[in-house]
Image (cartoon, rainbow, N blue to C red):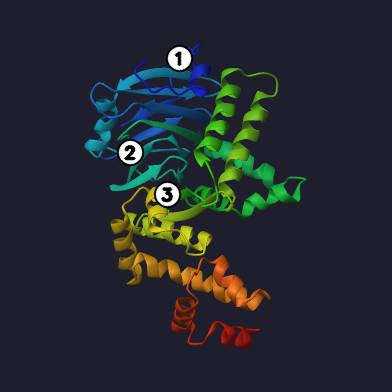
Amino acid sequence: MKAAETGGIMDMLEALDSLDSSIKVQNGESDFGRFYHMDVPFQLTLEYCNGSAPEDYVNVVTLSFEKSLLYQESSVTKNVSYAKNAPHFHDFFEFVIVLEGNIVQKIEGKDYLYTAGSCCLINRSLRHAEHYPSQTKVLYIGLSPDFVTGLFDTAQSSFFPSEKEFCDSDIYRFITADLKAPGKRAYLDFIPAYQNHQPAARLHTMAEDMIQTLLYPQFGAYYRICGLLCGFLNYLSSSQHYHCTNIRLDTGSDFLLFSRITRLFEESDGRMTRTELEQFLNYSGDYLNRIVNKYTDMCLYDYGMTFCLKKVAQCLTESDESISAIAARLKFTNRTHFYALFKEKYGVTPKEYRKLHS
């Protein structure tokens, strides 16, 4: 195979038999919207490649309890639907999980960049296509409406109160809303939390466990795969691990990026540097600055500072920590500059603010 050295997952696939695919394609020649029908409760599809050059290949592995498939196609063939703007949609819910590299999702004609460790959840009405611009490994998890309903019903009737808490998650609300009123074109965007170190490695481990279970099923394999899928859903639902944003069709790709910047500033109290944002979001600082300015009329630094000063105000009213200690913890090194910024925003000094709001 002309593919990257992938280890782990790939080692398990050497003995995989090739059978018929569980997903049937309708309107395959359509440039408007190919329709994918899945005739199993769930399916995993792993795709990996070296890049998008003509000599590169995309390796595709699909796994379900019933059928499996292993095949190759050239990167040129894989990306032709993207180039022709020939998207697809399907009758199942699909998680797109980037394990390595980057992908570009063309969703309803708009391009969105997803880096390693990030994910999205596509509903049943959204037209989309994927493009692999470089060495990439992506896992797709397809869940049928009946299967996911069964998982949710189990959570609702669980003996464990903590399990029922999942019913208050963004994933639960998003899928339930689509089940009750299908037809709305929307998706969930997941980016790793700032403190979530090596999210792609964690997702990779989850993928290995699910693939291992489907390749070598033993007694209880169905319950194990259900448990692994529930663990995956729970992991994405945790705000400690991921920031989740519900994106409607009329939401521009630049607003999605702005919401990602906002979530990261919220988590880091505005103290993510320009360089850190560039590395985390894979966009240039100049472009990020333009996006922030479009929605706030502020530069990237000033927008981050609003979150930092908000945290200062919160600490002043909710703790007995000294003002100098608060300033030091939030990385202010110049006392005069700190006081000037705070008074400009709140109209009073930190000491006066604490007295007024204590």
Where residue 302 sits, quadrant-wise, is: bottom left
- Residue 108 makes an appearance in the image: no
**Precedes in sequence: disc 2 or disc 1:** 1
Quickly name the residue at label 2. Answer: 129
Q: Tag 2: Cα neighbours inside 10 Å, few (<14), some, or many (≥20)? A: many
Location of mark 3 (residue): 280
> In the rendered structure, are the residues bearing label 2 and label 3 in contact, judged by CB atoms less than 8 Å apart?
no
Element at label 1: loop
Q: From the viewer's perspective, is 209 left or right of 288?
A: right
- Where is residue 54 drawn, in percent x and y? 23, 24
* Quarter of the image where one finds residue 288: bottom left
How far apart in space, not on screen, are marks 2 and 1 (Cα)? Answer: 25 Å
**Marks 3 and 1, how far apart in space?**
40 Å
Residue at image location 53% in from the left, 35% down from the top: 201
Check disc 1 and give the amino acid type: Leu
Mark 2 or mark 1, whichever is nearer to me = 2
Q: Residue at x 50, y 19 (%)?
A: 67
**Secondary element type, mark 2:** strand
Mark 3 or mark 1: name the one nearer the start of the chain. 1
The answer to whether residue 237 is left or right of residue 131 is right
Q: Earlier in the sequence, mark 2 or mark 3?
A: 2
Q: Residues within 10 Å of mark 3 (few under 14, many from 20)?
A: some
Question: In the displayed structure, would residue 67 be above or below residue 248?
Answer: above
Q: Amino acid at mark 3?
A: Phe
Residue in view at x 37 percent, y 21 percent: 3
- Is the C-beta separation of discs 2 and 1 under 8 Å? no
Quarter of the image with the N terminus in it: top left
* Circle 1 Cα neighbour tier, 10 Å, few/some/many (<14 / 14–19 / ≥20): few
- Residue picked out by circle 1: 19
Which of discs 3 and 1 lies nearer the camera? The answer is 3
- Which of the 4 image quarters holds residue 120? top left
